[in-house]
Image (cartoon, helix red, strand yellow):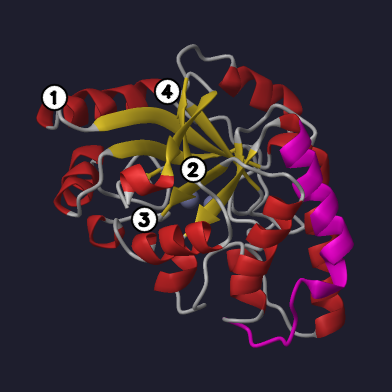
């Protein structure tokens, strides 16, 4: 798969590699259409407001990477987290001219901490949090704070796969369908995040049944990315995720330029 529209450089709080090194690894893996999506979490991982995102740092990384690899197409994106909880800050970040692509993310529980920092102990607690998570995403789906909805089902990696609580998203299939319909109607994309394969989930985020629901709801725009935070992870799970996208009935992968979707035939980028 030649497209990777979700990965992080040292501009992100949780990554340390220059963008050029990430791009070198991508290039060696045969990738051509890239978009860097560094974290801009408007509430940080502890729930504290954060306005530290600096586009000039992204631009410096892009300048170096593009000079080194002129044969790669490297777009200028951002992974915008918790936008609805601080809508004025989100508007300010997105007022920046020349943004190619915005991933919409929700990383924090209703209590404010990143899912990463939350201990999950029982099914009831998890179901309550999942319902709030999905209601947030439904609200987000109706806004222009994003182009592609990132890693839908994200909390499950911590609830089930880390903390061992037997829980899944099926009790909320109706709510998920409502989110997917909203995306489809509004011309927003759904991200297929391949990191689930690397993390042992055996499936991307979201899993195949949700991709099929989206397709059946009329959804056509999907983006794909590895969510790599280091060069060694740039290609992890990407080909499997691409094959699954095809198997779920999608014919195109969506690239973005200046926040406009540019679908490209799946078969042309495999
Ligand atoms: Zn994320
Ligand atoms: Zn990410």
Q: Earlier in the sequence, mark 1 or mark 2?
A: 1
| Residue that appears at 24% across and 55% down | 231
Q: Which of marks 4 and 1 is in front?
A: 1
Q: Does the magenta stretch include residue 223?
A: no
Residue 55 - label: 4
**Based on the displayed image, in which of its 4 quarters is residue 184 positioned?**
top right
Give the distance between the C-alpha atoms of the residues marked 4 and 1, in whole angstroms.
18 Å
Q: Which of marks 4 and 2 is in front?
A: 2
Residue for badge 3:
228
**Based on the displayed image, in which of its 4 quarters is residue 175 positioned?**
bottom right
In the displayed image of the protein, which residue is found farthest to the left? 68
Residue for badge 2:
252
Residue for badge 1:
67
**Based on the displayed image, in which of its 4 quarters is residue 209 positioned?**
bottom right
Image side of residue 88 versus residue 65, left or right = right
Contact between marks 4 and 2 (CB within 8 A): the answer is no
Q: Nearer the viewer, mark 3 or mark 2?
A: 2
């Amino acid at each position: 798969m030649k497209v990777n529209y979700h990965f992080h450089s040292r501009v992100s709080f949780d990554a340390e590699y220059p963008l050029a090194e990430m791009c070198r690894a991508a290039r060696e893996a045969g990738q051509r259409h890239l978009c860097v999506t560094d974290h801009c979490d408007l509430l940080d991982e502890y729930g504290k407001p954060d306005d530290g995102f600096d586009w000039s740092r992204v631009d410096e990384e892009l300048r170096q990477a593009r000079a080194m690899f002129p044969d790669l197409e490297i777009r200028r994106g951002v992974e915008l987290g918790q936008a609805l909880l601080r809508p004025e800050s989100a508007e300010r970040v997105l007022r920046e001219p020349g943004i190619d692509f915005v991933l919409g993310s929700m990383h924090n529980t209703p209590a404010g901490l990143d899912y990463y920092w939350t201990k999950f102990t029982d099914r009831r607690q998890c179901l309550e949090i999942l319902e709030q998570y999905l209601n947030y995403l439904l609200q987000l789906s109706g806004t222009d704070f994003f182009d592609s909805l990132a890693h839908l089902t994200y909390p499950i990696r911590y609830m089930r796969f880390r903390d061992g609580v037997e829980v899944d998203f099926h009790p909320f299939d109706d709510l998920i369908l409502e989110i997917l319909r909203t995306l489809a109607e509004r011309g927003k994309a759904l991200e297929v995040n391949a990191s689930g394969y690397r993390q042992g989930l055996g499936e991307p985020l979201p899993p195949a049944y949700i991709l099929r629901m989206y397709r059946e709801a009329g959804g056509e725009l999907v983006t794909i990315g590895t969510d790599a935070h280091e060069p060694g992870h740039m290609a992890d799970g990407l080909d499997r995720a691409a094959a699954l996208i095809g198997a779920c009935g999608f014919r195109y992968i969506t690239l973005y330029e200046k926040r406009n979707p540019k679908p490209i035939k799946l078969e042309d980028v495999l």
